[in-house]
Image: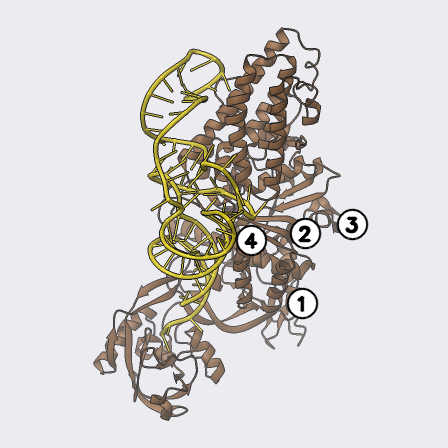
RNA sequence: GGGCUCAUAGCUCAGUUGGCUAGAGCGUUACAUUGACAUUGUAAAGGUCAGAGGUUCGACUCCUCUUGGGCCCACCA
């Protein structure tokens, strides 16, 4: 053995041997009780970041349960990441002086498909480098035909159950990227913008968006505001940049008399609140900004200008006409931005598919209240409830091509929508017309992601017998859903809703949430800040075991952590310490063999005994004491993993192995090694390797095989206390 | 405006249902050692556990308030 542990000589070789031997498959324990985790599918097109490295928590759970004899499945997958990926691809096109408008839909889709599949292996290789014991034979992609089929079926079922509706409603629309977004995707930013006080006939009102005035269909005041009682329900004459006009004054509680002048212009087509007010008062929707972000004909001389330009031009014109009372240029408010390109989102009316959320959300809330789903750490329950209790209907249409196209066809003759499970309908079921056109939109990626637990398990072909999926039967509901708390609402809550809806069962029994990995200064890693650290570089430098251990050690579940190089270094040294402990014990074995004292220890199980068996070899009082102490260690580590207290387990292992076992016991036994004490020493060491294996799989395997060359630690049984 | 979370050694963080002299890593200081360990070992210094009240035989831990970070949510034109 080398005097220094070199992870580069070990990790790849060991991973390959595990995979080749099929140890990642749940079938290694064919008769074990099922234990299953679905890997949150990383973006197929992007390299891993530290959030993915945190999936080490899942590997710990899987390896531990596998050793405990469970039939443990860790299901891998890759996400097509619709808009995300198309955005990256379009940037790539732009570098070549092209744009998506240069291609037809099918060509563009195929180009992105090729682009993604060229990059996809990278992500999978990185998961391997981290030592993740994923069953690659079951790998799924969100655009696999059988997954797509399931997504179609869900949509059709929802449509038939009246949970899906199509409505012309305001959506968050990015006029640069040409697509709408769900509420969750909007990024809010505080900005200082001028607040214009403009004259509307006898009234004065405050607005930040004078350019939308062409879309005004009313002016509103608070019903209790005595200043304006006489105008309510009257039409007032106003002077505008386009000449004289008339507009109705309505009363609505939405108006805050304290704000501005207590008068609001109502523009239902371009403001979420105004849209609601408009619905209450039956006001027409007058769209004056197009999906290209430009003013429409209704804006008269301003038509064709971008909304932002039009604002300046309109204000200038109004000032000329004396229609501006004053401008408050210290006004601070929040505006919604596109999370990707950071441009201002335009609320625009658009026909979209929506899912009614109330009944789905209620079922998901009940599942947690009835403890069918348990959330760890428990404090995240509140976040979960709060989201679901206040949820709004989910806009699932996206105007991108990279995704699952919505299986709905519009009848050009009678305006009926045909929704199918993916089959192209021959004719309209209402009027018989064959003039059917498929909706151009694709599903929000999270719509397919929300079905991932049952969709993966139902579609693992090799496990389908007589059209029934054995995987689904055996592993659903899954045992644990482990992910970052930042996607509790985006993903976990939606999976709960859709999973319960489609299967009648919760998709997972336990939700385990880890925190975020920030940069060494505690700041969130982001590309724009340039502080992103590539986890794979650290794996190269410190070894996967050290990186894994550093991520778990010293941070309680659900808490954020700052990436710590000193900690990584400490864990690398811990690897080296382990290595030299193994090396030392191995040397004692050689000494004993040379002395031919091999009657008891020369069998294949030499130095590989359980706590119970060790009792008869622990003759020396100190040996007996250390057998007892390791027995306690087994209890503690087991208890802590069972309770998702990984940092306790890691801390206990680190402290015991180094500062108890190595510093004290090995030093004690050094001068008095005989055959019996050697058996105790080496057996206790191997037990500790097993306890450490879920955390540091590579080095524990390498060391284990120095003692027991013909076996693998990863399929050994978990030590019994 | 609401909610969550954090505040413990110079730095990064543990402290599980309240219980002996509050721990780890890195850093600092002294000594030892080339040994199984690109070191490691032994020892030391370093904490009013943010602040103020309260509950209790006992509070880092539970409750209330205050201060200061971080995150999330929310329709104020």
Q: Identify the mark nearer the N-term, 1 or 4.
A: 4
Q: Is mark 2 on a helix, strand or loop?
A: loop
Other residues around mark 1 within 10 Å, as few (<14) / some (14–19) / many (≥20): few
Q: Distance between the residues labelled 3 and 4?
A: 41 Å
Q: Which residue is drawn at 69% across and 23% down?
A: A615
Residue A450 sits in which quadrant? Answer: bottom right
Note the chain letter of the yellow one.
B
Q: Circle 1 sits on which residue?
A: A426
**Mark 1 or 2: the one toward you:** 2
Q: Distance between the residues labelled 1 and 4?
A: 52 Å
Do residues under tags 3 and 4 come within 8 Å of each other at their CB atoms?
Answer: no
**Mark 1 or 4: the one toward you:** 4
Do residues under tags 3 and 1 come within 8 Å of each other at their CB atoms?
Answer: no
Q: Identify the mark nearer the N-term, 3 or 4.
A: 4
Asked if residue A51 shows in the view, the reply is yes
Q: Is mark 3 on a helix, strand or loop?
A: loop
Q: Do labels 3 and 4 share a chain?
A: yes
Asked if residue A441 shows in the view, the reply is no
Q: Is residue A695 left or right of residue A294?
A: right
Q: Distance between the residues labelled 3 and 1?
A: 30 Å
Decide: is B45 above or below A242: above
Q: What element carries label 4?
A: loop
- Chain where mark 3 sits: A
> Any mark on residue A567, and which?
none
**Mark 3 or 4: the one toward you:** 4
Q: Residue at x 42, y 49 (%)?
A: A92
């Amino acid at each position: 053995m080398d005097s220094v542990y070199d992870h580069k000589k070990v990790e790849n070789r060991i991973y390959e041997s595990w995979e080749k031997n099929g140890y990642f498959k749940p079938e290694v324990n064919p008769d074990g009780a099922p234990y299953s985790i679905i890997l949150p599918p990383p973006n197929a097109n992007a390299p891993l970041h530290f959030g993915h490295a945190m999936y080490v928590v899942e590997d710990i759970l899987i390896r531990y349960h596998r050793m405990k004899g469970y039939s443990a499945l860790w299901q891998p997958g890759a996400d097509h990441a619709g808009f995300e990926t198309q955005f990256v691809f379009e940037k790539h096109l732009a570098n070549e002086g092209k744009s998506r408008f240069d291609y037809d839909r099918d060509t563009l889709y195929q180009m992105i498909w090729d682009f993604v599949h060229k990059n996809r292996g990278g992500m999978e290789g990185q998961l391997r480098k981290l030592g993740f014991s994923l069953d690659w034979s079951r790998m799924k992609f969100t655009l696999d035909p059988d997954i797509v089929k399931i997504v179609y079926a869900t949509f059709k079922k929802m449509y038939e159950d009246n949970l899906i509706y199509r409505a012309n409603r305001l959506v968050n629309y990015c006029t640069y990227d040409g697509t709408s977004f769900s509420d969750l995707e909007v990024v809010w930013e505080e900005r200082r913008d001028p607040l214009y006080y403009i004259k509307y006939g006898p009234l004065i009102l405050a607005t930040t968006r004078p350019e939308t005035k062409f879309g005004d269909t009313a002016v509103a005041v608070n019903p209790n505001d005595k200043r304006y009682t006489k105008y309510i329900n009257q039409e007032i004459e106003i002077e505008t940049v386009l000449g004289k006009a008339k507009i109705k004054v309505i009363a609505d509680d939405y108006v805050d008399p304290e704000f501005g002048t207590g008068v609001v212009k109502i523009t239902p087509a371009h403001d979420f609140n105004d849209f609601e007010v408009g619905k209450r008062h039956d006001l027409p929707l007058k769209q004056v900004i197009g999906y290209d972000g430009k003013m429409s004909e209704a804006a008269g001389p301003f038509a064709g200008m971008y909304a932002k330009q039009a604002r300046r031009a309109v204000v200038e014109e109004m000032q000329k006409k004396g229609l501006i009372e004053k401008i408050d240029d210290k006004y601070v408010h929040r505006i919604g931005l596109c999370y990707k390109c950071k441009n201002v989102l335009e609320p625009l009316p658009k026909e979209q598919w929506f899912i009614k959320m109330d009944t789905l959300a209620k079922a998901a809330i009940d599942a947690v209240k009835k403890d069918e789903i348990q959330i760890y750490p428990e404090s995240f329950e509140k976040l979960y409830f709060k989201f679901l209790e206040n949820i709004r209907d989910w806009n699932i249409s996206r105007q991108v091509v990279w995704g699952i196209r919505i299986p709905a066809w519009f009848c050009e003759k009678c305006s009926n929508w045909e929704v199918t499970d993916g089959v192209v309908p021959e004719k309209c079921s209402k009027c018989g017309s064959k003039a059917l056109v498929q909706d151009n939109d694709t599903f929000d990626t999270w719509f397919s992601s929300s079905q991932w637990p049952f969709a993966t398990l139902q579609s693992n072909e090799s496990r389908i017998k007589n059209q029934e999926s054995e995987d689904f039967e055996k592993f659903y509901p899954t045992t644990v859903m482990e992910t970052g708390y930042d996607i509790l609402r985006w993903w976990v809550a939606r999976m709960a809703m859709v999973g319960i809806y489609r299967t009648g069962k919760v998709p997972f029994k336990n939700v385990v949430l880890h925190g975020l990995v920030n940069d060494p200064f505690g700041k969130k890693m982001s590309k724009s800040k340039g502080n992103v650290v590539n986890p794979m570089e650290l794996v190269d430098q410190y070894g996967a075991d050290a990186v894994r251990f550093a991520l778990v050690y010293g941070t309680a579940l659900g808490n954020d952590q700052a990436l710590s190089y000193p900690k990584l270094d400490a864990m690398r040294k811990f690897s080296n310490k382990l290595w030299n402990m193994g090396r030392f014990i191995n040397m004692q074995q050689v000494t004993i063999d040379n002395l031919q004292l091999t009657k008891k220890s020369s069998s294949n199980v030499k130095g590989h005994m359980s706590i119970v068996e060790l009792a008869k070899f622990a003759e020396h009082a100190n040996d007996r004491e250390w057998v007892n102490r390791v027995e306690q260690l087994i209890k503690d580590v087991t208890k802590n993993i069972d309770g998702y207290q990984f940092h306790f387990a890691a801390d206990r292992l680190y402290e015991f192995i180094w500062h108890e076992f190595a510093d004290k016991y090995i030093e004690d036994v050094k001068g008095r090694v005989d055959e019996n004490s050697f058996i105790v020493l080496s057996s206790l060491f191997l037990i500790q390797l097993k306890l450490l294996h879920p955390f540091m799989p590579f080095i524990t395997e390498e060391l284990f095989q120095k003692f027991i060359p013909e076996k693998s630690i990863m399929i050994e049984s978990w030590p019994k206390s």
